[in-house]
Amino acid sequence: MRLGDLASTLFPITPTAAAVEITGISADSRAIVPGTLFAALKGVAADGARFAPDAVKRGAAAVLCGLDSLVPDDIGVPVLRAADPRIALSLLAARFYPLQPEHIVAITGTSGKTSVAAFVRQIFEAAGHQAASVGTIGVVSPAGSNYGSLTTPDPVQLHQILDRLAREGVTHAAIEASSHGLDQHRLDGVRISAAGFTNLGRDHMDYHPTVEDYFAAKMRLFGDLLPEGAPAVVDADGGYAEAVMATIARRGQRLIDVGAKGRAIKLVSATPDRFSQSLDLIVFGQSMRVELPLLGDFQVSNALVAAGLAIGAGVAPETAIAALGRLVGAPGRLELVGTTAKGAMVFIDYAHKPDALDHALAALRPVTKGRLIALFGAGGDRDAGKRPLMGEAAARHADLVIVTDDNPRSEDPAAIRKAVMAGAPDAIEIGDRGRAISEAIGMLEAGDVLCVAGKGHETGQIIAGVVHHFSDHEVVAAALATEVAA
Ligand SMILES: CC(=O)N[C@H]1[C@@H](OP(=O)(O)OP(=O)(O)OC[C@H]2O[C@@H](n3ccc(=O)[nH]c3=O)[C@H](O)[C@@H]2O)O[C@H](CO)[C@@H](O)[C@@H]1O[C@H](C)C(=O)N[C@@H](C)C(=O)N[C@H](CCC(=O)O)C(=O)O
Ligand SMILES: Nc1ncnc2c1ncn2[C@@H]1O[C@H](COP(=O)(O)OP(=O)(O)OP(=O)(O)O)[C@@H](O)[C@H]1O
Ligand SMILES: N[C@H](CCC[C@H](N)C(=O)O)C(=O)O
Ligand SMILES: [Mg+2]
Protein backbone atom coordinates (compact mmCIF):
# COMPACT_ATOMS: atom_id res chain seq x y z
CA MET A 1 0.00 0.00 0.00
CA ARG A 2 1.26 3.51 -0.83
CA LEU A 3 2.03 5.81 2.10
CA GLY A 4 -0.38 8.33 0.59
CA ASP A 5 -3.27 5.83 0.67
CA LEU A 6 -2.33 4.74 4.17
CA ALA A 7 -1.81 8.08 5.86
CA SER A 8 -2.80 11.10 3.79
CA THR A 9 -6.06 11.74 5.66
CA LEU A 10 -4.15 11.79 8.96
CA PHE A 11 -0.93 13.61 7.99
CA PRO A 12 0.24 16.24 5.51
CA ILE A 13 2.25 14.20 2.99
CA THR A 14 4.36 15.41 0.05
CA PRO A 15 3.74 13.76 -3.35
CA THR A 16 7.16 12.06 -3.21
CA ALA A 17 6.42 10.63 0.24
CA ALA A 18 2.91 9.61 -0.86
CA ALA A 19 4.39 7.35 -3.53
CA VAL A 20 6.50 5.34 -1.04
CA GLU A 21 5.38 1.70 -0.87
CA ILE A 22 4.62 0.42 2.65
CA THR A 23 4.76 -3.36 3.08
CA GLY A 24 4.17 -3.62 6.84
CA ILE A 25 4.03 -1.73 10.15
CA SER A 26 5.95 -2.32 13.36
CA ALA A 27 6.73 -0.54 16.62
CA ASP A 28 9.78 -2.74 17.16
CA SER A 29 12.97 -1.82 15.32
CA ARG A 30 14.16 -5.40 15.67
CA ALA A 31 11.27 -6.58 13.49
CA ILE A 32 11.85 -4.09 10.66
CA VAL A 33 12.30 -5.49 7.16
CA PRO A 34 12.63 -3.31 4.03
CA GLY A 35 9.40 -1.40 3.32
CA THR A 36 8.07 -1.37 6.91
CA LEU A 37 6.70 1.76 8.55
CA PHE A 38 8.44 2.06 11.94
CA ALA A 39 6.42 3.57 14.81
CA ALA A 40 8.83 5.14 17.31
CA LEU A 41 6.85 5.06 20.57
CA LYS A 42 7.78 6.18 24.07
CA GLY A 43 7.32 3.17 26.32
CA VAL A 44 7.67 2.22 29.96
CA ALA A 45 11.29 1.12 29.56
CA ALA A 46 12.56 2.92 26.43
CA ASP A 47 11.93 5.68 23.90
CA GLY A 48 11.47 4.13 20.47
CA ALA A 49 12.99 7.26 18.91
CA ARG A 50 16.39 5.89 19.97
CA PHE A 51 15.90 2.98 17.63
CA ALA A 52 14.74 4.98 14.59
CA PRO A 53 18.22 5.20 12.95
CA ASP A 54 18.62 1.43 13.30
CA ALA A 55 15.10 0.89 11.89
CA VAL A 56 16.00 3.02 8.84
CA LYS A 57 19.24 1.06 8.42
CA ARG A 58 17.15 -2.12 8.34
CA GLY A 59 15.03 -0.66 5.54
CA ALA A 60 12.17 1.20 7.26
CA ALA A 61 10.34 3.16 4.54
CA ALA A 62 8.80 5.77 6.89
CA VAL A 63 8.83 6.66 10.58
CA LEU A 64 5.85 7.60 12.74
CA CYS A 65 6.64 9.50 15.95
CA GLY A 66 5.44 12.15 18.41
CA LEU A 67 5.45 15.91 17.75
CA ASP A 68 8.37 16.46 20.12
CA SER A 69 10.12 13.18 19.30
CA LEU A 70 13.91 13.05 19.02
CA VAL A 71 13.60 11.46 15.55
CA PRO A 72 15.34 13.96 13.19
CA ASP A 73 13.42 15.22 10.15
CA ASP A 74 16.41 14.40 7.94
CA ILE A 75 16.55 10.71 8.88
CA GLY A 76 16.32 9.80 5.19
CA VAL A 77 12.71 8.58 4.96
CA PRO A 78 9.37 10.40 5.42
CA VAL A 79 8.68 11.26 9.09
CA LEU A 80 5.03 11.45 10.20
CA ARG A 81 4.56 13.39 13.43
CA ALA A 82 1.39 12.84 15.47
CA ALA A 83 0.13 14.46 18.68
CA ASP A 84 -0.44 10.91 19.98
CA PRO A 85 1.58 8.42 17.94
CA ARG A 86 -0.04 5.42 19.68
CA ILE A 87 -3.48 6.49 18.46
CA ALA A 88 -2.05 7.17 15.00
CA LEU A 89 -0.42 3.71 14.98
CA SER A 90 -3.75 2.04 15.74
CA LEU A 91 -5.55 3.99 13.04
CA LEU A 92 -2.83 3.20 10.48
CA ALA A 93 -2.91 -0.48 11.45
CA ALA A 94 -6.70 -0.48 11.01
CA ARG A 95 -6.24 0.96 7.53
CA PHE A 96 -3.39 -1.38 6.57
CA TYR A 97 -5.43 -4.42 7.67
CA PRO A 98 -8.85 -3.09 6.67
CA LEU A 99 -11.24 -5.96 7.35
CA GLN A 100 -12.89 -6.58 10.71
CA PRO A 101 -15.70 -8.94 11.70
CA GLU A 102 -18.98 -7.07 11.37
CA HIS A 103 -19.87 -7.38 15.05
CA ILE A 104 -17.12 -6.90 17.60
CA VAL A 105 -17.85 -6.79 21.31
CA ALA A 106 -15.18 -5.79 23.83
CA ILE A 107 -15.05 -6.68 27.54
CA THR A 108 -13.17 -4.96 30.31
CA GLY A 109 -13.03 -5.33 34.11
CA THR A 110 -10.58 -6.70 36.65
CA SER A 111 -11.81 -10.30 36.55
CA GLY A 112 -13.93 -12.33 34.18
CA LYS A 113 -12.85 -10.93 30.81
CA THR A 114 -11.53 -14.22 29.41
CA SER A 115 -14.56 -16.11 30.68
CA VAL A 116 -17.02 -13.57 29.25
CA ALA A 117 -15.21 -13.53 25.88
CA ALA A 118 -15.36 -17.33 25.72
CA PHE A 119 -19.06 -17.31 26.68
CA VAL A 120 -19.97 -14.64 24.12
CA ARG A 121 -18.21 -16.69 21.43
CA GLN A 122 -20.22 -19.77 22.46
CA ILE A 123 -23.50 -17.82 22.42
CA PHE A 124 -22.71 -16.43 18.96
CA GLU A 125 -21.98 -20.00 17.79
CA ALA A 126 -25.26 -21.23 19.27
CA ALA A 127 -27.03 -18.47 17.32
CA GLY A 128 -25.51 -19.87 14.13
CA HIS A 129 -22.77 -17.29 13.58
CA GLN A 130 -19.12 -17.82 12.66
CA ALA A 131 -17.53 -16.57 15.88
CA ALA A 132 -14.15 -15.96 17.46
CA SER A 133 -12.64 -14.67 20.69
CA VAL A 134 -9.35 -12.84 21.24
CA GLY A 135 -7.67 -12.53 24.63
CA THR A 136 -5.54 -14.12 27.34
CA ILE A 137 -6.09 -17.64 26.02
CA GLY A 138 -5.24 -16.50 22.47
CA VAL A 139 -7.39 -16.43 19.37
CA VAL A 140 -10.15 -19.05 19.26
CA SER A 141 -12.00 -19.32 15.95
CA PRO A 142 -13.56 -21.96 13.68
CA ALA A 143 -10.12 -22.28 12.04
CA GLY A 144 -8.61 -23.40 15.38
CA SER A 145 -6.94 -21.70 18.28
CA ASN A 146 -3.54 -20.17 18.73
CA TYR A 147 -2.00 -18.72 21.79
CA GLY A 148 -0.69 -15.15 21.94
CA SER A 149 1.26 -13.58 24.76
CA LEU A 150 -0.84 -10.51 25.60
CA THR A 151 -4.50 -10.22 26.68
CA THR A 152 -5.05 -7.35 24.24
CA PRO A 153 -2.54 -7.79 21.39
CA ASP A 154 -0.60 -4.73 20.18
CA PRO A 155 -2.51 -2.80 17.49
CA VAL A 156 -0.63 -4.15 14.50
CA GLN A 157 -1.08 -7.75 15.59
CA LEU A 158 -4.69 -7.10 16.63
CA HIS A 159 -5.67 -5.68 13.25
CA GLN A 160 -3.83 -8.45 11.45
CA ILE A 161 -5.85 -10.96 13.51
CA LEU A 162 -9.19 -9.18 12.89
CA ASP A 163 -8.48 -8.92 9.15
CA ARG A 164 -7.62 -12.64 9.00
CA LEU A 165 -10.73 -13.61 10.97
CA ALA A 166 -12.95 -11.55 8.67
CA ARG A 167 -11.34 -13.15 5.60
CA GLU A 168 -12.00 -16.59 7.14
CA GLY A 169 -15.68 -15.68 7.33
CA VAL A 170 -15.92 -14.78 11.03
CA THR A 171 -18.73 -12.24 11.43
CA HIS A 172 -18.90 -12.07 15.24
CA ALA A 173 -15.97 -11.60 17.62
CA ALA A 174 -15.41 -10.93 21.32
CA ILE A 175 -12.21 -9.17 22.44
CA GLU A 176 -10.74 -8.70 25.91
CA ALA A 177 -9.81 -5.08 26.61
CA SER A 178 -7.09 -4.98 29.28
CA SER A 179 -6.31 -1.74 31.11
CA HIS A 180 -2.83 -1.75 29.52
CA GLY A 181 -4.42 -2.23 26.12
CA LEU A 182 -6.88 0.61 26.64
CA ASP A 183 -4.24 2.91 28.16
CA GLN A 184 -1.85 2.25 25.27
CA HIS A 185 -4.59 2.78 22.65
CA ARG A 186 -4.17 -0.78 21.31
CA LEU A 187 -7.93 -0.90 20.52
CA ASP A 188 -8.41 2.56 19.08
CA GLY A 189 -8.94 1.45 15.48
CA VAL A 190 -11.37 -1.36 16.31
CA ARG A 191 -15.01 -0.85 15.30
CA ILE A 192 -16.69 -1.92 18.54
CA SER A 193 -20.43 -2.52 18.41
CA ALA A 194 -21.07 -3.39 22.08
CA ALA A 195 -18.95 -3.22 25.23
CA GLY A 196 -19.14 -4.87 28.64
CA PHE A 197 -17.84 -4.20 32.14
CA THR A 198 -17.52 -6.99 34.70
CA ASN A 199 -16.13 -5.49 37.93
CA LEU A 200 -13.23 -3.55 39.38
CA GLY A 201 -10.87 -4.69 42.12
CA ARG A 202 -7.18 -4.35 42.84
CA ASP A 203 -4.86 -5.08 39.92
CA HIS A 204 -1.85 -3.74 38.04
CA MET A 205 -0.84 -1.27 40.74
CA ASP A 206 2.68 -1.62 39.33
CA TYR A 207 1.57 0.09 36.10
CA HIS A 208 -1.21 2.44 37.20
CA PRO A 209 -0.20 4.97 39.88
CA THR A 210 -3.64 4.91 41.56
CA VAL A 211 -6.90 2.93 41.47
CA GLU A 212 -8.49 6.03 39.86
CA ASP A 213 -5.94 5.90 37.04
CA TYR A 214 -6.61 2.17 36.59
CA PHE A 215 -10.36 2.81 36.52
CA ALA A 216 -9.93 5.72 34.10
CA ALA A 217 -8.02 3.44 31.71
CA LYS A 218 -10.88 0.93 31.79
CA MET A 219 -13.39 3.73 31.27
CA ARG A 220 -11.76 4.63 27.94
CA LEU A 221 -13.75 1.71 26.51
CA PHE A 222 -17.01 3.54 27.20
CA GLY A 223 -15.75 7.14 27.31
CA ASP A 224 -13.79 7.07 24.01
CA LEU A 225 -14.18 3.86 22.02
CA LEU A 226 -17.80 2.68 22.13
CA PRO A 227 -19.91 4.94 19.90
CA GLU A 228 -22.92 6.88 21.18
CA GLY A 229 -26.13 4.88 21.12
CA ALA A 230 -24.31 1.52 21.16
CA PRO A 231 -25.20 -1.11 23.78
CA ALA A 232 -23.15 -1.06 26.99
CA VAL A 233 -23.44 -4.00 29.38
CA VAL A 234 -22.68 -3.68 33.09
CA ASP A 235 -22.85 -6.13 35.97
CA ALA A 236 -24.93 -3.87 38.23
CA ASP A 237 -23.82 -5.88 41.31
CA GLY A 238 -20.10 -5.41 40.61
CA GLY A 239 -17.67 -2.87 42.07
CA TYR A 240 -17.77 0.59 40.42
CA ALA A 241 -20.98 -0.26 38.51
CA GLU A 242 -22.56 3.10 39.29
CA ALA A 243 -19.56 5.07 38.10
CA VAL A 244 -19.52 3.04 34.86
CA MET A 245 -23.23 3.63 34.34
CA ALA A 246 -22.71 7.37 34.81
CA THR A 247 -20.20 7.37 31.92
CA ILE A 248 -22.60 5.31 29.80
CA ALA A 249 -25.43 7.79 30.50
CA ARG A 250 -23.17 10.74 29.69
CA ARG A 251 -22.22 9.14 26.37
CA GLY A 252 -25.84 8.36 25.47
CA GLN A 253 -25.13 4.64 25.15
CA ARG A 254 -27.84 1.99 25.57
CA LEU A 255 -27.42 0.50 29.04
CA ILE A 256 -28.01 -3.23 29.45
CA ASP A 257 -27.60 -3.77 33.18
CA VAL A 258 -27.49 -7.33 34.45
CA GLY A 259 -27.50 -9.13 37.82
CA ALA A 260 -29.59 -8.97 40.99
CA LYS A 261 -29.62 -5.17 40.77
CA GLY A 262 -29.90 -5.26 36.97
CA ARG A 263 -33.03 -4.16 35.15
CA ALA A 264 -32.48 -5.34 31.57
CA ILE A 265 -31.44 -8.88 32.58
CA LYS A 266 -32.55 -9.31 36.16
CA LEU A 267 -31.32 -12.23 38.22
CA VAL A 268 -34.28 -13.21 40.40
CA SER A 269 -32.57 -16.22 41.95
CA ALA A 270 -29.68 -18.62 41.45
CA THR A 271 -30.14 -22.02 43.06
CA PRO A 272 -26.93 -24.05 43.12
CA ASP A 273 -27.01 -27.81 42.62
CA ARG A 274 -23.39 -28.90 43.12
CA PHE A 275 -21.79 -28.20 39.73
CA SER A 276 -24.61 -26.25 38.14
CA GLN A 277 -27.12 -23.62 39.14
CA SER A 278 -30.66 -22.92 38.16
CA LEU A 279 -31.17 -19.28 37.16
CA ASP A 280 -34.50 -17.48 37.33
CA LEU A 281 -34.31 -14.38 35.17
CA ILE A 282 -36.44 -11.53 33.91
CA VAL A 283 -35.03 -10.68 30.50
CA PHE A 284 -36.38 -7.44 29.07
CA GLY A 285 -39.58 -8.01 31.03
CA GLN A 286 -39.95 -11.71 30.18
CA SER A 287 -39.45 -14.51 32.72
CA MET A 288 -36.90 -17.11 31.67
CA ARG A 289 -35.21 -20.01 33.41
CA VAL A 290 -31.97 -21.77 32.53
CA GLU A 291 -29.69 -24.35 34.14
CA LEU A 292 -26.16 -22.87 34.04
CA PRO A 293 -23.67 -25.77 34.01
CA LEU A 294 -20.99 -23.82 35.93
CA LEU A 295 -19.91 -23.45 39.53
CA GLY A 296 -19.66 -20.16 41.43
CA ASP A 297 -21.57 -16.89 41.82
CA PHE A 298 -19.04 -15.12 39.66
CA GLN A 299 -19.83 -17.35 36.69
CA VAL A 300 -23.47 -16.23 36.93
CA SER A 301 -22.26 -12.66 36.59
CA ASN A 302 -19.96 -13.58 33.69
CA ALA A 303 -22.74 -15.52 31.94
CA LEU A 304 -25.22 -12.64 32.26
CA VAL A 305 -22.71 -10.06 31.00
CA ALA A 306 -22.03 -12.40 28.06
CA ALA A 307 -25.76 -12.79 27.35
CA GLY A 308 -26.17 -8.99 27.48
CA LEU A 309 -23.33 -8.52 24.99
CA ALA A 310 -24.67 -11.14 22.60
CA ILE A 311 -28.14 -9.58 22.77
CA GLY A 312 -26.57 -6.14 22.25
CA ALA A 313 -24.91 -7.53 19.12
CA GLY A 314 -28.26 -8.72 17.77
CA VAL A 315 -28.81 -12.26 19.14
CA ALA A 316 -32.45 -12.89 20.16
CA PRO A 317 -32.83 -12.91 23.98
CA GLU A 318 -34.40 -16.43 24.01
CA THR A 319 -31.48 -17.80 21.97
CA ALA A 320 -28.87 -16.11 24.17
CA ILE A 321 -30.41 -17.34 27.43
CA ALA A 322 -30.94 -20.87 26.10
CA ALA A 323 -27.25 -20.93 25.08
CA LEU A 324 -26.24 -20.32 28.71
CA GLY A 325 -27.49 -23.86 29.39
CA ARG A 326 -24.62 -25.28 27.31
CA LEU A 327 -21.71 -23.02 28.28
CA VAL A 328 -18.30 -24.56 28.77
CA GLY A 329 -15.91 -22.71 31.13
CA ALA A 330 -12.77 -21.15 29.70
CA PRO A 331 -9.74 -23.47 30.12
CA GLY A 332 -8.12 -23.20 33.55
CA ARG A 333 -10.96 -21.18 35.07
CA LEU A 334 -12.33 -23.19 38.02
CA GLU A 335 -11.85 -26.29 35.90
CA LEU A 336 -12.35 -29.68 37.53
CA VAL A 337 -9.32 -31.60 36.26
CA GLY A 338 -9.49 -34.80 38.24
CA THR A 339 -10.58 -36.83 41.21
CA THR A 340 -8.25 -38.86 43.39
CA ALA A 341 -8.76 -42.55 44.14
CA LYS A 342 -9.96 -41.58 47.62
CA GLY A 343 -12.53 -39.19 46.16
CA ALA A 344 -10.97 -35.73 46.48
CA MET A 345 -11.40 -33.20 43.69
CA VAL A 346 -8.66 -31.12 42.03
CA PHE A 347 -9.46 -27.81 40.32
CA ILE A 348 -7.24 -25.54 38.26
CA ASP A 349 -8.03 -21.83 38.39
CA TYR A 350 -6.44 -18.61 37.09
CA ALA A 351 -6.98 -16.47 40.20
CA HIS A 352 -3.84 -14.34 40.52
CA LYS A 353 -5.33 -11.34 42.28
CA PRO A 354 -7.02 -11.03 45.70
CA ASP A 355 -10.64 -10.66 44.50
CA ALA A 356 -10.36 -13.54 42.08
CA LEU A 357 -8.92 -15.81 44.78
CA ASP A 358 -11.71 -14.73 47.10
CA HIS A 359 -14.39 -15.64 44.57
CA ALA A 360 -12.79 -18.85 43.33
CA LEU A 361 -12.33 -20.27 46.83
CA ALA A 362 -15.81 -19.13 47.94
CA ALA A 363 -17.24 -20.95 44.93
CA LEU A 364 -15.48 -24.19 45.91
CA ARG A 365 -16.57 -24.20 49.58
CA PRO A 366 -20.11 -25.53 48.91
CA VAL A 367 -18.75 -28.54 46.97
CA THR A 368 -16.14 -29.29 49.66
CA LYS A 369 -17.10 -32.01 52.13
CA GLY A 370 -13.67 -32.25 53.74
CA ARG A 371 -10.88 -29.65 53.67
CA LEU A 372 -10.48 -26.89 51.12
CA ILE A 373 -6.78 -26.55 50.17
CA ALA A 374 -5.51 -23.50 48.30
CA LEU A 375 -2.19 -23.73 46.42
CA PHE A 376 -0.85 -20.62 44.71
CA GLY A 377 1.91 -18.02 44.49
CA ALA A 378 2.20 -14.52 43.08
CA GLY A 379 3.84 -13.29 39.89
CA GLY A 380 7.13 -11.40 40.02
CA ASP A 381 7.58 -7.94 38.38
CA ARG A 382 3.90 -7.25 39.04
CA ASP A 383 2.04 -5.31 41.73
CA ALA A 384 3.78 -6.32 44.97
CA GLY A 385 0.97 -4.88 47.12
CA LYS A 386 -1.41 -7.67 46.14
CA ARG A 387 0.79 -10.41 47.64
CA PRO A 388 -0.24 -10.26 51.33
CA LEU A 389 -3.84 -9.60 50.24
CA MET A 390 -3.82 -12.85 48.26
CA GLY A 391 -2.42 -14.60 51.32
CA GLU A 392 -5.21 -13.16 53.46
CA ALA A 393 -7.92 -14.13 50.95
CA ALA A 394 -6.64 -17.71 50.89
CA ALA A 395 -6.33 -17.91 54.68
CA ARG A 396 -9.89 -16.61 55.04
CA HIS A 397 -11.42 -19.32 52.85
CA ALA A 398 -9.15 -22.35 52.93
CA ASP A 399 -8.48 -24.89 55.66
CA LEU A 400 -4.94 -25.31 54.43
CA VAL A 401 -2.84 -22.89 52.37
CA ILE A 402 0.22 -23.94 50.36
CA VAL A 403 2.33 -21.06 49.08
CA THR A 404 4.45 -21.86 46.05
CA ASP A 405 5.96 -20.05 43.04
CA ASP A 406 3.96 -18.57 40.18
CA ASN A 407 6.07 -16.77 37.55
CA PRO A 408 8.89 -15.19 39.59
CA ARG A 409 10.13 -13.44 36.41
CA SER A 410 13.20 -11.40 37.48
CA GLU A 411 12.45 -11.45 41.22
CA ASP A 412 13.73 -13.60 44.11
CA PRO A 413 11.03 -16.30 44.45
CA ALA A 414 11.62 -16.69 48.20
CA ALA A 415 10.97 -12.99 48.76
CA ILE A 416 7.68 -13.20 46.83
CA ARG A 417 6.57 -16.21 48.90
CA LYS A 418 7.49 -14.37 52.10
CA ALA A 419 5.32 -11.41 51.06
CA VAL A 420 2.37 -13.72 50.32
CA MET A 421 2.86 -15.52 53.65
CA ALA A 422 2.68 -12.23 55.52
CA GLY A 423 -1.07 -12.56 54.84
CA ALA A 424 -1.19 -16.32 55.51
CA PRO A 425 1.28 -16.99 58.34
CA ASP A 426 0.12 -20.58 58.88
CA ALA A 427 0.68 -21.56 55.26
CA ILE A 428 3.00 -24.37 54.20
CA GLU A 429 5.79 -23.11 51.91
CA ILE A 430 6.96 -25.28 49.01
CA GLY A 431 8.76 -23.18 46.40
CA ASP A 432 8.96 -25.72 43.58
CA ARG A 433 5.50 -25.63 41.99
CA GLY A 434 5.64 -29.16 40.61
CA ARG A 435 6.62 -30.59 43.98
CA ALA A 436 4.01 -28.45 45.75
CA ILE A 437 1.26 -29.82 43.51
CA SER A 438 2.28 -33.47 43.91
CA GLU A 439 2.67 -33.12 47.68
CA ALA A 440 -0.73 -31.42 47.91
CA ILE A 441 -2.35 -34.23 45.91
CA GLY A 442 -0.65 -36.74 48.21
CA MET A 443 -2.28 -35.05 51.23
CA LEU A 444 -5.84 -35.28 49.88
CA GLU A 445 -8.42 -37.30 51.78
CA ALA A 446 -11.96 -38.22 50.72
CA GLY A 447 -14.11 -35.09 50.32
CA ASP A 448 -11.17 -32.67 50.17
CA VAL A 449 -10.90 -30.11 47.38
CA LEU A 450 -7.59 -28.75 46.07
CA CYS A 451 -7.55 -25.49 44.15
CA VAL A 452 -4.34 -24.96 42.16
CA ALA A 453 -4.57 -21.26 41.41
CA GLY A 454 -2.75 -18.57 39.46
CA LYS A 455 -1.55 -20.10 36.21
CA GLY A 456 -4.73 -21.54 34.65
CA HIS A 457 -4.09 -22.24 30.96
CA GLU A 458 -0.41 -21.15 31.04
CA THR A 459 2.15 -23.55 29.60
CA GLY A 460 5.32 -21.86 30.83
CA GLN A 461 6.90 -20.72 34.06
CA ILE A 462 9.14 -17.64 33.89
CA ILE A 463 12.09 -18.01 36.27
CA ALA A 464 14.96 -15.51 36.17
CA GLY A 465 13.61 -14.24 32.86
CA VAL A 466 13.70 -17.68 31.20
CA VAL A 467 10.47 -19.44 30.17
CA HIS A 468 10.48 -23.11 31.18
CA HIS A 469 7.75 -25.43 29.92
CA PHE A 470 5.30 -25.88 32.79
CA SER A 471 1.62 -26.73 32.86
CA ASP A 472 -0.51 -27.14 35.98
CA HIS A 473 -2.71 -29.45 33.89
CA GLU A 474 0.20 -31.76 33.04
CA VAL A 475 1.60 -31.77 36.58
CA VAL A 476 -1.81 -32.55 38.12
CA ALA A 477 -2.45 -35.30 35.55
CA ALA A 478 0.96 -36.87 36.25
CA ALA A 479 0.45 -36.70 40.03
CA LEU A 480 -3.02 -38.27 39.74
CA ALA A 481 -1.67 -41.03 37.49
CA THR A 482 1.09 -41.84 40.01
CA GLU A 483 -1.44 -41.82 42.80
CA VAL A 484 -3.63 -44.33 40.98
CA ALA A 485 -0.59 -46.51 40.19
CA ALA A 486 0.63 -46.45 43.81
C1 LIG B 1 4.16 -2.50 30.28
C2 LIG B 1 3.58 -2.76 28.92
O1 LIG B 1 2.39 -2.88 28.77
N1 LIG B 1 4.44 -2.85 27.90
C3 LIG B 1 3.94 -3.04 26.56
C4 LIG B 1 4.33 -1.85 25.72
O2 LIG B 1 5.71 -1.79 25.74
P1 LIG B 1 6.43 -0.40 25.89
O3 LIG B 1 5.91 0.51 24.84
O4 LIG B 1 6.34 0.08 27.27
O5 LIG B 1 7.91 -0.89 25.50
P2 LIG B 1 9.37 -0.38 25.86
O6 LIG B 1 10.14 -1.60 26.18
O7 LIG B 1 9.39 0.77 26.82
O8 LIG B 1 9.90 0.15 24.45
C5 LIG B 1 9.40 1.34 23.82
C6 LIG B 1 9.29 1.10 22.36
O9 LIG B 1 10.59 0.84 21.83
C7 LIG B 1 10.54 -0.29 21.00
N2 LIG B 1 11.86 -0.93 20.95
C8 LIG B 1 12.44 -1.44 22.05
C9 LIG B 1 13.69 -2.05 21.97
C10 LIG B 1 14.36 -2.11 20.71
O10 LIG B 1 15.47 -2.64 20.54
N3 LIG B 1 13.71 -1.59 19.64
C11 LIG B 1 12.50 -1.00 19.71
O11 LIG B 1 11.98 -0.55 18.70
C12 LIG B 1 9.46 -1.16 21.62
O12 LIG B 1 8.93 -2.07 20.67
C13 LIG B 1 8.42 -0.11 22.02
O13 LIG B 1 7.58 0.19 20.96
O14 LIG B 1 3.88 -2.04 24.39
C14 LIG B 1 4.37 -3.24 23.76
C15 LIG B 1 3.78 -3.29 22.35
O15 LIG B 1 2.38 -3.19 22.41
C16 LIG B 1 3.97 -4.47 24.54
O16 LIG B 1 4.52 -5.63 23.95
C17 LIG B 1 4.49 -4.32 25.99
O17 LIG B 1 3.94 -5.40 26.69
C18 LIG B 1 4.82 -6.07 27.60
C19 LIG B 1 5.60 -7.16 26.89
C20 LIG B 1 3.98 -6.68 28.73
O18 LIG B 1 4.41 -7.57 29.43
N4 LIG B 1 2.77 -6.20 28.91
C21 LIG B 1 1.84 -6.71 29.94
C22 LIG B 1 2.10 -6.11 31.32
C23 LIG B 1 0.45 -6.35 29.47
O19 LIG B 1 0.25 -5.56 28.55
N5 LIG B 1 -0.54 -6.97 30.08
C24 LIG B 1 -1.91 -6.67 29.74
C25 LIG B 1 -2.83 -7.04 30.87
C26 LIG B 1 -2.97 -8.50 31.22
C27 LIG B 1 -4.17 -8.78 32.09
O20 LIG B 1 -4.06 -8.72 33.32
O21 LIG B 1 -5.26 -9.07 31.54
C28 LIG B 1 -2.27 -7.40 28.43
O22 LIG B 1 -3.10 -6.87 27.67
O23 LIG B 1 -1.72 -8.50 28.19
N1 LIG C 1 -16.72 -12.09 37.54
C1 LIG C 1 -15.73 -12.46 38.34
N2 LIG C 1 -15.58 -11.92 39.58
C2 LIG C 1 -14.56 -12.29 40.39
N3 LIG C 1 -13.64 -13.23 40.07
C3 LIG C 1 -13.74 -13.80 38.85
C4 LIG C 1 -14.78 -13.45 37.93
N4 LIG C 1 -14.61 -14.18 36.81
C5 LIG C 1 -13.52 -14.93 37.00
N5 LIG C 1 -13.00 -14.74 38.23
C6 LIG C 1 -11.77 -15.31 38.82
O1 LIG C 1 -10.70 -14.72 38.08
C7 LIG C 1 -9.93 -15.71 37.40
C8 LIG C 1 -9.61 -15.22 36.01
O2 LIG C 1 -10.80 -15.20 35.26
P1 LIG C 1 -10.77 -14.70 33.75
O3 LIG C 1 -9.57 -15.28 33.12
O4 LIG C 1 -12.07 -14.95 33.14
O5 LIG C 1 -10.56 -13.12 34.01
P2 LIG C 1 -9.68 -12.04 33.26
O6 LIG C 1 -10.31 -10.73 33.59
O7 LIG C 1 -9.57 -12.38 31.83
O8 LIG C 1 -8.27 -12.15 33.96
P3 LIG C 1 -6.84 -11.64 33.33
O9 LIG C 1 -6.90 -10.15 33.39
O10 LIG C 1 -5.85 -12.18 34.27
O11 LIG C 1 -6.71 -12.18 31.97
C9 LIG C 1 -10.81 -16.96 37.39
O12 LIG C 1 -10.01 -18.11 37.34
C10 LIG C 1 -11.58 -16.82 38.68
O13 LIG C 1 -10.78 -17.22 39.75
N1 LIG D 1 -1.81 -10.92 32.23
C1 LIG D 1 -1.35 -11.09 33.58
C2 LIG D 1 -1.23 -12.54 33.85
C3 LIG D 1 -0.66 -12.92 35.22
C4 LIG D 1 -0.63 -14.40 35.43
C5 LIG D 1 0.07 -14.89 36.64
N2 LIG D 1 0.36 -16.27 36.45
C6 LIG D 1 1.34 -14.10 36.93
O1 LIG D 1 2.35 -14.44 36.35
O2 LIG D 1 1.29 -13.18 37.73
C7 LIG D 1 -0.03 -10.35 33.77
O3 LIG D 1 0.82 -10.48 32.91
O4 LIG D 1 0.09 -9.65 34.75
MG1 LIG E 1 -8.03 -12.47 30.54
Image (cartoon, grey):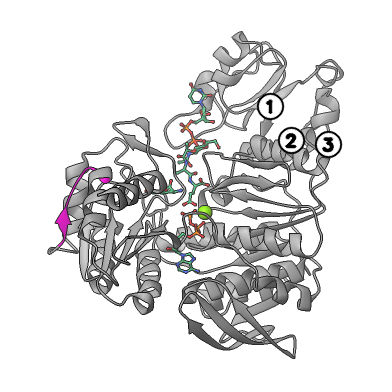
Residue 429 inside the magenta-drawn segment? yes
Q: Residue at x 67, y 30 (%)?
A: 81
The earlier-in-sequence mark between 2 and 3 is 3
- Between marks 1 and 3, how big is the CA–CA gap? 17 Å
Residue extending farthest top: 57
Residue position marked by numbered label 1 in the rendering:
25
Rendering coords of residue 411 (x, y %): 25, 38
**Horizontal side, residue 144 vs residue 412: left or right:** right
SS at mark 3? loop
Badge 3 is on which residue? 9
* Separation (CA) of disc 2 from disc 3: 10 Å
Residue 387 appears in view: yes
Disc 3 marks which amino acid? Answer: Thr
> Residues in magenta?
427-433
Structural distance between the alpha carbons of marks 1 and 2: 8 Å
Q: Secondary structure at mark 2?
A: helix
Mark 2 CB near ligand 1 (8 Å cut):
no
| Observer-nearest of 142 and 367 | 367
* Kind of residue sitting beneath label 2: Leu
Instruction: Please give left or right for residue 357 compared with residue 51 in the image.
Output: left
Quarter of the image with the N terminus is top right
What type is the residue that disc 1 sits on?
Ile
Residue 92 is labelled as 2
In the rendered view, does 137 fall on the left or right side of 97?
Answer: left
Judging depth in this view, the residue of 362 and 250 nearest the camera is 362
Mark number displayed over residue 123: none
Q: Secondary structure at mark 1?
A: strand
Q: Residue at x 37, y 59 (%)?
A: 353
Query: Does the CB distance between marks 1 and 2 fall below 8 Å?
Result: yes
